Structures are given as structure tokens and as C-alpha cells.
Amino acid sequence: MPIPNHTIFGKRITDNSGVSFGEVRKISDESEQLRYLKRRLEAYLIEQTDPMGERKIYSPFPLTVLTCVASETLGRIIEPVLVYEKDPRKRQEIPKIVSIKVYGMLDKKLTRPLTQEYKEAMQIIWPSDDIKSISSYSELFHSYLRTSFIHGYRGKNVFLTEEITSWIFEEGSLYLNPYWFWTAYKNTFENCFSKILDTKEKNNPLRRNALDYFYRLINE
């Protein structure tokens, strides 16, 4: 248990005071555990990013990076990461697998495969890249947006613009409105936790996976 008990876990559900890891570790009710997980993410991720998302601070590039980080985090909560870790092949691809899952939830159209025409247009721009292996727009988000921004703070064939409503693929490149990206993430976050906190379904996979994430968070 490397995180000391006195370390602040997040904010309390009832007010804005801090709650420690030690206090959260004493909670035995699963629904309460999950509500504290949600509150932690609201306080430390969403509320601290929102000033950029609401343009109180004009920072579209940092906003995009944080939305990618937030998407992977949500993916690690809702996906069966413990199962993936037992698979030698999937273990190496966990960031990609969980991120793509969430990107597809932001807009179902992102799960669609790139057409051969689009792949050919993209291949002209990036002749040395393995374009054939890109299965969907969600994968394009991960490989050419998230990874490129995280490792070098630059977009590669995914470019930011506020001149469109959400996203478009045009002339071999993908264009993304970062403010739509953040808003779509927040909506997905709420929808996912609505399902996570639903106790009606006995075998709720999202709830089970979220509890696994919570247990690892407080114990590892």
C-alpha cells in the first residue's frame, strides 16, 4: 500500500473538504466507493480542465491533450484491464485499446472504418506510414492525435480548428474542434458513471471494471 493514508484522495461528496486515502479505504459500501471515485475525477480532472473547455482560459492545445488523458483514464475504468493484462499481446496495447473504446463513445461515427479512398489520400501525405493497419477513425485519434501530442506536443494528420462543429476527415487529414472534443468527453463521462452506479443489473461489467480500478487505486 504505497500511498500513505494521510494523502488526499479527493474531495468529499458532501462538501469541498479533502478526504484522505485512509478514510476512503475504510469505506465498504461499493456504491459509496464508486461515488468517491467519480468525485475524485470530477474534482481533479474535470473541474480543473473546465476553465479551458469553457474558454475562460484560451488553451485549445492543452485542452486537447487533457481530453486525451481523460479519455484513456475513463477507458481504464470501464474496460476489463485486469483481463487484458493477462494477454501478452493486449497487455502492450492497453492504452490504445481503452482509448479507442472511449473515442468511439464520443461519436459512434468514429468507430467506422476508414474507406479505401481516405486511406489512399492519407497515404499520399504520409507515404512511409502503415496506413493500411488503421482500422477506424478512433484509432486515427489515438495514433495520430493522442500519441503525437503526448510525445512531442504536435498533431500528426489530426489538426485543431474551431471552424467546424465536431470533426471531419478531408483531403487525407482529420480536423477536430477541441471544444467539441472536451464537451463530448464530459457527456460520455456522465453516461458511463450513470451506468456504473446503476445497481439494477446484477452482472454490470462497467460497474465491476470500475470497482477493479478503484481497488487498484487505493491498494497499489
Image: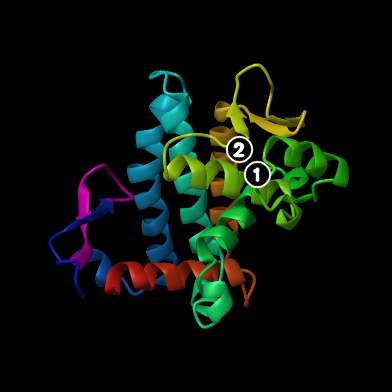
Q: Evaluate whether residue 203 shows in this view.
A: yes
Q: Nearer the viewer, residue 169 or 163?
A: 169
Above or below residue 197? Residue 67 is above
Task: Tell me the CA gap for discs 1 and 2.
Answer: 5 Å
Q: What is the number of the mark on residue 106? A: 1
Asked where in the image residue 166 lies, by quadrant, the reply is top right
Q: Residues within 10 Å of mark 2 (few under 14, many from 20)?
A: some
Q: Position of residue 61 (x, y in %)?
A: 46, 28
Quick check: marks 1 and 2 in contact, CB under 8 Å? yes
Q: Report the residue at 87% width, 41% height from top.
A: 117
Q: Report the residue at 39% width, 67% height from top.
A: 214
Q: Which residue is mark 2?
A: 184
User: Which residue is situated farthest in the bottom direction here?
Assistant: 86
Q: Indicate yes or no whether the magenta region holds residue 18.
A: yes
Check disc 2 and give the amino acid type: Ala
Q: Report the residue at 50% width, 47% height from top.
A: 147
Work out which quarter of the rendered image holds the C terminus and state it: bottom left
Range of residues picked out in magenta: 11-22
Q: Evaluate whether residue 105 shows in this view.
A: no
